[in-house]
Image: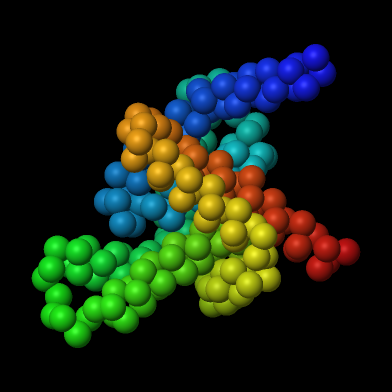
């Protein structure tokens, strides 16, 4: 009976997250599009991660209207710094993804396979993981110079292996589920990305940074 109650409680807790994930997804898509997609990914993610993490500037505004205005204001403030923090990794991911797409389409020469194709996949994976490590560090240490964030993001893949693996596995699982149940990706994809980045990477970095300064 206790196990059944625990299971029901877990299901209810998961369902309670659905409206929040939907709202985060819609906000993430809107902010990403506002930045021209490529330029909007980093500031949109940084803004919503800060919101979910409990940033005082964003959490202090009660009501949908004031909260939305605070988010837009934060997004404008984040546009340059967040792109500076994550921009290089966005470009790496885009370049690697373009190679992968061209390879799948058969538009690349035969010598590109299999080594070039495998390297493109590796660069895409490392670039994506480093991007969200960089955004997480930027949210926690907004005044840190960009080169420090870049080194920290690359080092974080090794320094925080459990968090990196958990983030990757969760998002890969979400992508696979979205391929089977398409509304999951269409309605919750951005929200899942923001939530996993906040709950896994930001919290892990927060614990490590707190321990380093203790």
Q: Residue at x 35, y 46 (%)?
A: 32
Give percent across and percent down for residue 205.
69, 59
Regarding residue 88, the answer to whether it shows in the image is: no
- Residue 175 seen in the current view: yes
Give left or right: position of 158 versus 178: right
Foreground pick, 12 / 67: 12
Classify residue 140 as left or right of residue 39.
right
Q: Quarter-wise, where is residue 95 in the image? A: bottom left
Quarter of the rendering occupied by the C terminus: bottom right
Give the image location of residue 196, x and y in percent: 56, 45
Furthest-bottom residue in this view: 111
Which of the 4 quarters of the picture holds residue 5?
Answer: top right
Image quarter where the N terminus lies is top right
Q: Is residue 123 above or below residue 10?
A: below
Is residue 37 left or right of 63 when viewed as pictured?
left
Compared with residue 3, is residue 191 higher up or lower down, i.e. above or below?
below
Q: Nearer the viewer, residue 45 or 179?
A: 179
Q: Residue at x 30, y 44 (%)?
A: 33
101 displayed left or right of 106:
right
The residue depicted at 46 percent of the width and 50 percent of the height is 172
Please report the residue visible at 70 percent of the width from the left and 22 percent of the height from the top: 7
């Amino acid at each position: 009976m206790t196990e059944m109650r625990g299971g029901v409680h877990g299901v209810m807790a998961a369902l309670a997250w659905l409206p929040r994930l939907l709202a985060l997804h819609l906000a993430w898509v809107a902010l990403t599009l506002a930045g021209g997609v490529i330029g909007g990914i980093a500031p949109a993610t940084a803004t919503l991660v800060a919101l979910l993490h409990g940033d005082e500037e964003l959490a202090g505004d009660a009501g949908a209207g004031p909260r939305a205005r605070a988010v837009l204001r934060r997004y404008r403030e984040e546009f340059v710094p967040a792109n500076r923090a994550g921009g290089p990794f966005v470009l790496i991911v885009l370049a690697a993804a373009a190679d992968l797409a061209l390879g799948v389409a058969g538009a690349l020469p035969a010598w590109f396979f299999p080594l070039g194709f495998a390297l493109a996949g590796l660069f895409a994976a490392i670039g994506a993981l480093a991007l969200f490590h960089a955004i997480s560090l930027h949210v926690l240490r907004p005044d840190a110079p960009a080169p420090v964030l870049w080194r920290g993001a690359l080092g974080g893949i090794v320094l925080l292996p459990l968090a990196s693996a958990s983030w990757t596995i969760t998002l890969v699982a979400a992508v696979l589920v979205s391929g089977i149940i398409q509304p999951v990706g269409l309605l919750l994809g951005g929200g899942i990305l923001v939530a996993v980045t906040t709950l896994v990477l930001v919290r892990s970095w927060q614990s490590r940074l707190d321990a380093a300064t203790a």
